[in-house]
């Protein structure tokens, strides 16, 4: 008959579920982040489908399912390993660890006693009720006594010897013992000379147990009589306790009646006070409701006044901008290239060059630089900066995520830093004569507390497969309207770029992309100089497609219309083309800026 599959336990030793113990009796138990996993783990280092426990050939095995960070048994990496009771399994290098434990049933064996009186053992062996034991060997000191011939059988002419005294017949017990084991010697005397004291010893052995039995019987009788007396005393104590309980219950009833009589008037008085308090509360609530109605009316009037004030301020801002674009020597507004040059010159100090420094460690333990560069722009008087999420969190997006999967790279979180510099400022400096490093004194940085990440749009994940050798499934951020982040330069007072509705531009309208394409590769002097690119709108729907040239460093930069307003955010380039870029609508950035809700 085939053996039943054993059950097993998993005791969590480390991780979010530390201290828990799970019981399984399945042939296959899958582990991973997937919703279909039998043992789901959402911790860092656990893959979507990480590993599985499988019962095979009478044993449980741990089988790695092509995980990113590997599976370890007793701190050794394992791909297909047989498990023993007590093995420690860990998912990932720093993932959760648990102990594998089989469920077993312990049997208790009670040994049989072999102690018995020697006389009883010999009697049982003589009667055939018990197998004979090993015979005692004769000691060297015991002499070999000759057998005396009978009197009538003596040889003629031989000297006559004195006949020995006739010994009394041996006891029945001794005869049975000798018949059971003729070779065993029970005395140093020869068999013909057994002393007569054996019968007295047998009598003593029979009388003593009988006397002990009688004494035990008498003792039991005395104990029984004492127990009867104790039962009578216990019965009397119970009757007394029952009487005390009755008296206690009567006292409680009397106390309850006294409480009802004494506290009745107090309760009625409390009820009258509660009614009075409730009446006063209703009156106060009515007064507060009237005041709240008046407050709401005042708030609506204040909101209308603020909207009117904002409208007037926007009108004044538009008028001021038009005055900026007048030609230097006449009263005509600038047009064409002169207009776009004036816009770029005015808005360039409000555009920032962003550098995100972060390092990782690969499977060989080497440190890997994962830094990226991008663009952002000031969008409020409080120093708020709009940029793309993939500029400050690049490891979530396909380009860097696929590399991390291929090279088995893990992020070193303590190396994460974000820096930014306004357009026209020096972002590099020389140290020690030749070595170049970031000039944090001329910009803003999370390292010195002058820059902070306020919030990002919600993450939207999708699953993709890695190429190359072993195909793996991993999560990446979806390419959508959620690729936005909001920073704040602490204490900065920089004129923001005005925001306008994306509906203000249409097909074939001229637009300008401001940013730092290719990052520091083209900033030869170490100064953050913007590189504008002109183009036209190709499509304006959920996103804005423009024909302006866009490269990697343009991500997060503003899309400017002919009136110097930001109508979009440069995000990505259509694959295979550098002159067809995709920009997010400015409305998504406005929601993130004024509330952070989508």
Image (cartoon, rainbow, N blue to C red):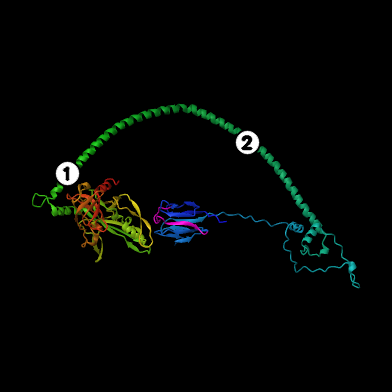
216 left or right of 11? right
Q: Main secondary structure of the magenta part?
A: loop
Q: Rate crowding at label 1 as few (under 14), some (14 to 19) or many (20 or more) other CA atoms within 10 Å.
A: few
Which callout, 2 or 1, points at the residue further toward the start of the chain?
2
Residue 166 can be seen in this image: yes
Q: CA distance from mark 2 to mark 1?
A: 99 Å
For residue 49: magenta?
yes
Residue 431 percent coordinates (x, y): 25, 64
The residue that disc 2 covers is: 238
Residue 14 can be seen in this image: no
- At x 53%, y 58%, the residue is 58
For residue 578: magenta?
no
User: 331 above or below 228?
Assistant: below
Q: Which residues are magenta?
A: 40-57
Taking depth in this image into account, of 537 and 92 the one nearest to the observer is 537
User: 313 above or below 26?
Assistant: above
Residue 239 falls in image quadrant? top right
Taking depth in this image into account, of 519 and 527 the one nearest to the observer is 519
The disc at residue 315 is 1
Residue found at the very far bottom of the displayed protein: 157
């Amino acid at each position: 008959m085939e053996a039943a599959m054993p059950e097993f336990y998993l005791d969590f030793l480390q991780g979010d579920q530390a201290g828990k113990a799970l019981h399984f009796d399945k042939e296959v138990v899958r582990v991973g982040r997937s919703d279909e996993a039998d043992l789901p783990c959402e911790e860092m280092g656990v893959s979507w489908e990480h590993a599985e426990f499988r019962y095979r050939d009478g044993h449980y095995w741990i089988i790695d399912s092509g995980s990113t960070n590997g599976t370890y048994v007793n701190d050794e990496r394992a791909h297909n390993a047989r498990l023993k009771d007590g093995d420690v399994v860990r998912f990932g290098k720093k993932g959760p660890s648990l102990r594998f434990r089989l469920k077993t049933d312990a049997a208790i064996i009670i040994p049989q006693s072999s102690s018995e009186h020697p006389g009883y053992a010999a009697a049982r062996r003589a009667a055939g009720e018990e197998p004979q034991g090993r015979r005692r060997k004769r000691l060297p000191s015991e002499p070999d006594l000759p057998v005396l011939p009978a009197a009538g059988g003596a040889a003629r002419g031989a000297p006559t010897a004195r006949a020995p005294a006739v010994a009394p017949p041996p006891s029945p017990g001794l005869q049975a013992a000798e018949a059971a084991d003729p070779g065993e010697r029970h005395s140093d005397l020869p068999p013909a000379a057994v002393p007569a004291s054996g019968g007295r010893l047998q009598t003593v052995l029979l009388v003593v147990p009988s006397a002990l039995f009688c004494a035990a019987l008498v003792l039991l009788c005395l104990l029984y009589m004492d127990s009867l007396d104790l039962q009578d005393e216990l019965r009397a104590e119970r009757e007394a306790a029952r009487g005390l309980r009755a008296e206690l219950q009567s006292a409680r009833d009397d106390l309850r009646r006294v409480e009802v009589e004494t506290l009745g008037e107090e309760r009625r008085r409390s009820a009258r006070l509660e009614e009075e308090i409730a009446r006063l509360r209703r009156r106060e609530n009515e007064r507060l409701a009237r005041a709240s109605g008046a407050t709401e009316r005042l708030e609506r009037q204040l909101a209308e006044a603020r909207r009117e004030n904002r409208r007037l301020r926007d009108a004044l801002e538009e008028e001021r901008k038009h005055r900026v674009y007048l030609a230097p020597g006449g009263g005509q507004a600038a047009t064409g290239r002169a207009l776009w040059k004036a816009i770029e010159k005015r808005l360039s100090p409000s555009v920032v060059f962003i550098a995100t420094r972060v390092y990782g460690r690969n499977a060989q333990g080497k440190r890997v630089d994962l830094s990226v560069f991008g663009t952002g722009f000031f969008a409020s008087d409080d120093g708020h900066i709009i940029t793309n999420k993939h500029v400050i969190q690049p490891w979530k997006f396909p380009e860097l995520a696929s590399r991390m999967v291929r090279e088995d790279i893990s992020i070193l979180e303590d190396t994460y830093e974000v820096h930014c510099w306004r357009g026209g400022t020096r972002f590099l400096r020389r140290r020690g004569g030749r070595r170049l490093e970031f000039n944090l004194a001329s910009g803003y940085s999370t390292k010195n507390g002058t820059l902070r990440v306020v919030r990002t749009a919600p993450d939207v994940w999708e699953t993709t497969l890695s190429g190359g050798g072993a195909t793996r499934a991993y999560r990446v951020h979806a390419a959508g309207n959620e690729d936005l982040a909001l920073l704040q330069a602490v204490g900065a007072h920089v004129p923001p770029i005005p925001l306008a509705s994306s509906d203000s531009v249409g097909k074939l309208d001229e637009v300008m992309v401001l940013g730092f394409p290719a990052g520091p590769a083209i900033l030869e002097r170490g100064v953050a100089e913007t590189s504008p690119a002109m183009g036209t709108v190709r499509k304006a729907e959920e996103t804005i497609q423009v024909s302006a040239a866009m490269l990697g460093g343009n991500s997060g930069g503003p899309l400017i219309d002919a009136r110097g307003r930001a109508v979009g955010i440069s995000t990505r380039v259509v694959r295979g083309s550098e002159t067809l870029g995709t920009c997010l609508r400015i409305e998504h950035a406005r929601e993130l800026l004024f509330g952070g809700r989508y």
